[in-house]
Image (cartoon, rainbow, N blue to C red):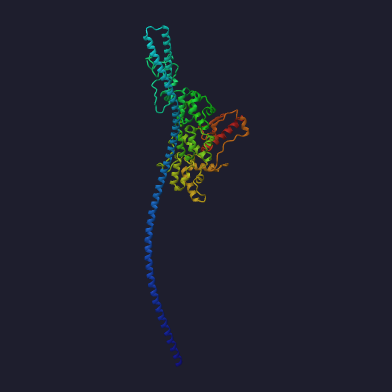
Amino acid sequence: MCVCAHACECTSNGNSESYQERLSRLEGDKESLILQVSVLTDQVEAQGVKISDLESSLVEHQHKLNSTEEMLQQELLHRTSLENQKLSLMGEVSYLKLKLADMEGKQGHGAERQHKAEGLLKELRILKDKVEHLEDQKLQYEKKLKATKVKESSNFHGVWTLKYTTSAQIPLLTVHSTFLNAVQCDVPQPQKVYPCPYRLRRTQSGGLQAADPDAGQFKRGGLRATAGPRLTRTPESYDSARDMNIPFSQWTKEQVCGWLEDYGLGQYVSLSRQWVENGQTLLSATPQDFEKEMGMKNPLHRKKLQLALRAFTTKVIEKSSELDHIWVTRWLDDIGLPQYKDQFHEARVDGRMIQYLTVNDLLTLKVTSQLHHLSIKCAIHVLHANKFNPHCLRRRPGEEKQPTPSEVVQWSNHRVMEWLRAVDLAEYAPNLRGSGVHGGLIILEPRFSSETLALLLNIPPQKTLLRRHLATAFSALVGPQATQEKREYGNATGHVPLTTTAKVKPKKLGFTQFSHLRKRKPDESADYICPIDSGALTMNGVSRLPSAALRGLSPSLDRQAERREQIGIKAEANGLKQ
């Protein structure tokens, strides 16, 4: 029993020692953990201070970023305003260049006239010298005559002979002096160095009336017995060229040449003076005569002259005749085709010619793109709808928030670019320069869609979100009805999409058409870019629209043309059955 008790005491002492060691170890660990926690709390406080500093710096950087964004926005607005000013200045510069070219051309013609006038003045000086020599001879003869009268012992026969020779010389001098002054009045003189104070006047009997009642005395600048009014060029001859009450056939040569100069065909005046006798010469001439006698090789110049002469004969005053060729060059700027201004200016295309332009005329003017043909066609249609108002196209944005299609159809190319900037596509807006895109093309051409506009803007196909945004803005611009019509036209069978590289080729005559060339005259009315009369035509008792001429002008016109063609076919079939 004692041994067992001693053993138990030994084990209890050993356990108490192990527990004390463990307790001391745990107390050491606790102290170390307390130190670690204090270190970690210090680190957390330091990190918190750093985080607060970073947050404050982040707020400062955010403020700086907002300020830089505002400055960038202001810079973009300033840049767009500068671009607008640059475009307007470029338009004014091009207009001034064209005006300068016109003035240089007129100055060249004036230099030619001055050179001719100088040659004629030299001849006039020679004639003056001759006249002065004859006057000296006349004075000598008069002195001799007075000497013979003083002599009392004179022979009657000798005196009669002397009087006869003297009286024969005086009319000769009068004729020379009168011709000299008449030719001097007819010479165009830019500085009016030699004015003509005398004018020829006719009496009722057809004779000539002297400007000076004292006819016994010889004076320089008298009247010639055989001279007619055509040798005198008075200011009335210029004013009568503007008088529409006088028929064109009764215009004189000077009036016709002055009219050609004002009409932009001054390069043909020199040859016209040799050929034209009066206005009737031009009215009865053919295009071949214009080419042969006037040297008019340009077919558009011949067409311009023919249209003007037809207006004189029909006496129909068209609103388009008030638009000259300078206005047409500015119109090309408005519809986005400034690259053709030189060709149109050389051809002197004016408002009247625009009304009668054909496909071949555009090919002559080097307009080969199908898209540009459609652009000019829709622009002419807008002019027709606005009665050729020169200010019908809108170049600047107005106060409207949501424009209607009737307003969009009058947008110019620059106004379409402003719309692109308004729908957040400002970086692609400069790509529309020279593309021919304007409001009339967007609304009136059924094949012109948002895809066509994306191609012209050079938006990559992989940017689907940007193209979808453009399609949404385009649909909101043209309206739901036009969008539906464009979609139906695009889904129709046989539809050919509009591309930016398609070219227009001239018509070729087949072998079957050569036999009819001599039998029928060419009719250009079917080839007009934009037909003048868009009304219905009556053929065989059936009302039809000229679908070949109006096809593609607008979707509504196309559907009307197809319906009327179907009605006409049914009516003809019923007539054949009856």
Q: Quadrant of residue 565?
A: top right
Task: Say whether residue 513 is left or right of residue 128.
Answer: right
The image position of residue 450, as x and y in percent, is 50, 45
Q: Residue at x 38, y 64 (%)?
A: 51
Q: Residue at x 40, y 18 (%)?
A: 136
Quadrant assignment for the N terminus: bottom left
Q: Residue at x 37, y 16 (%)?
A: 212
- Along the viewing direction, whichever of 341 and 110 lies nearer the viewer: 110
Q: Can residue 158 be seen in this snapshot?
A: yes
- Along the viewing direction, whichever of 204 and 530 lies nearer the viewer: 204
- Along the viewing direction, whichever of 366 and 71 lies nearer the viewer: 366
Q: Can residue 534 be seen in this snapshot?
A: no
Quadrant assignment for the C terminus: top right
Q: Is residue 386 above or below residue 256?
A: below
Q: How many marks?
A: 0
The image position of residue 223, as x and y in percent, is 41, 17
Which residue is most to the bottom? Answer: 2
The image position of residue 181, as x and y in percent, is 41, 21
- Along the viewing direction, whichever of 179 and 284 lies nearer the viewer: 179
The image position of residue 443, as x and y in percent, is 48, 40
Q: Is residue 477 above or below residue 54?
A: above
